[in-house]
């Protein structure tokens, strides 16, 4: 099968533009599966709970999941994409899976990083595995890489490939994902974002360097 990622710079707060950019960047793509970064639609550095709520959407009823379903159908691809999710009065740092046939499911990030703990609840849906025809996939979001249990549970649940949506700021993850793949005999697609966000007293430089890693601990694409 062919899998890939879209590495780009989401613009904070401009959901329409971020979706438009993903649609443009996937034009002519030849793959069964494409992974997008964490919080690709909203951007990362929220400065208040109100701001995070204003950019959050229901899944699957919200705008971004609907637009991703439309793009997945048009391009004939599966997409895993990080979205700021609202469920009632709770927010989750989530990633959806959509297929050419429509919405398939959601993963809610378990291991929240730093100030994410102010905005988001830790994930409550476990580590599900989805059969997409060509293989079975699981989903992790960014800082989940730090905890070996995440990839191990997905592998034990039958995943062949881990879709890893990321907004990385630390330099260690790419090397660690090679080990996660080796110890669990899985492939992984780490889709990281680029660019810088300076908001609310934070200054985050996102490190790019997205990669596809194989079960021999080999970097297949960087
Ligand atoms: C992170 O989990 N976004 C570093």
Image (tube, grey):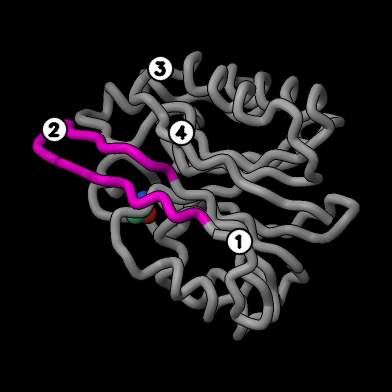
Badge 3: how crowded within 10 Å, few (<14), some, or many (20+)? few
The span from disc 1 to disc 2 (Cα, nearest Å) is 35 Å
Earlier in the chain: of badge 2 and badge 4, it is: 4
Residue holding disc 1: 221
Which of the labelled discs sits on residue 200, or is there none?
A: 2
- Whether residue 203 sits left or right of residue 120 in the image: it is left
Task: Tell me residue 55's x, y (percent).
Answer: 40, 22
Tell me the SS state at disc 1: strand
Asked whether the viewer can see residue 140, the reply is no
| Residue 98 within the segment the image draws in magenta | no
Task: Tell me residue 211's x, y (percent).
Answer: 55, 59
**Magenta stretch in the rendered image:** 193-210
Total tally of numbered discs in the picture: 4
Q: Is ligand 1 closer than 8 angstroms to the Cβ of mark 4?
A: no
Earlier in the chain: of badge 1 and badge 3, it is: 3
Asked whether the viewer can see residue 207, the reply is yes
Earlier in the chain: of badge 1 and badge 2, it is: 2
Residue holding disc 3: 14
Earlier in the chain: of badge 3 and badge 2, it is: 3
* Disc 2 and disc 4 in contact, CB within 8 angstroms: no
Residue holding disc 4: 84
Q: Is ligand 1 closer than 8 angstroms to the Cβ of mark 3?
A: no
Residue lying at 42% horizontally and 43% vertically, measured from the top left: 193
Toward the viewer: 69 or 128?
Answer: 69
Q: Residue furthest top?
A: 16
């Amino acid at each position: 099968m062919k899998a890939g990622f879209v590495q780009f710079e989401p613009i904070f707060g401009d959901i329409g533009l971020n979706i438009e950019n993903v649609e443009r960047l996937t034009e002519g793509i030849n793959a069964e599966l494409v992974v997008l970064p964490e919080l690709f639609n909203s951007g990362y550095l929220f400065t208040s709970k109100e701001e995070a709520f204003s950019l959050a959407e229901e899944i699957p009823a919200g705008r971004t999941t609907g637009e991703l379903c439309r793009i997945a159908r048009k391009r004939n691809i599966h997409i895993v994409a990080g979205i700021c999710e609202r469920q009632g009065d709770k927010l989750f740092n989530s990633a959806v899976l959509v297929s050419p046939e429509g919405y398939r499911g959601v993963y809610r990030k378990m291991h929240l990083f730093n100030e994410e703990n102010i905005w988001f609840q830790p994930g409550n849906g476990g580590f599900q595995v989805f059969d997409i025809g060509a293989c079975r996939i699981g989903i992790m979001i960014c800082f989940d890489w730090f905890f070996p249990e995440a990839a191990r549970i997905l592998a034990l649940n039958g995943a062949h490939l881990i879709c890893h949506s990321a907004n990385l700021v630390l330099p260690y993850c790419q090397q660690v994902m090679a080990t996660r793949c080796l110890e669990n005999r899985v492939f992984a697609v780490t889709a990281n974002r680029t660019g810088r966000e300076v908001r609310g007293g934070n200054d985050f430089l996102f490190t790019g360097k997205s990669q596809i890693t194989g079960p021999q601990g080999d970097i297949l694409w960087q």
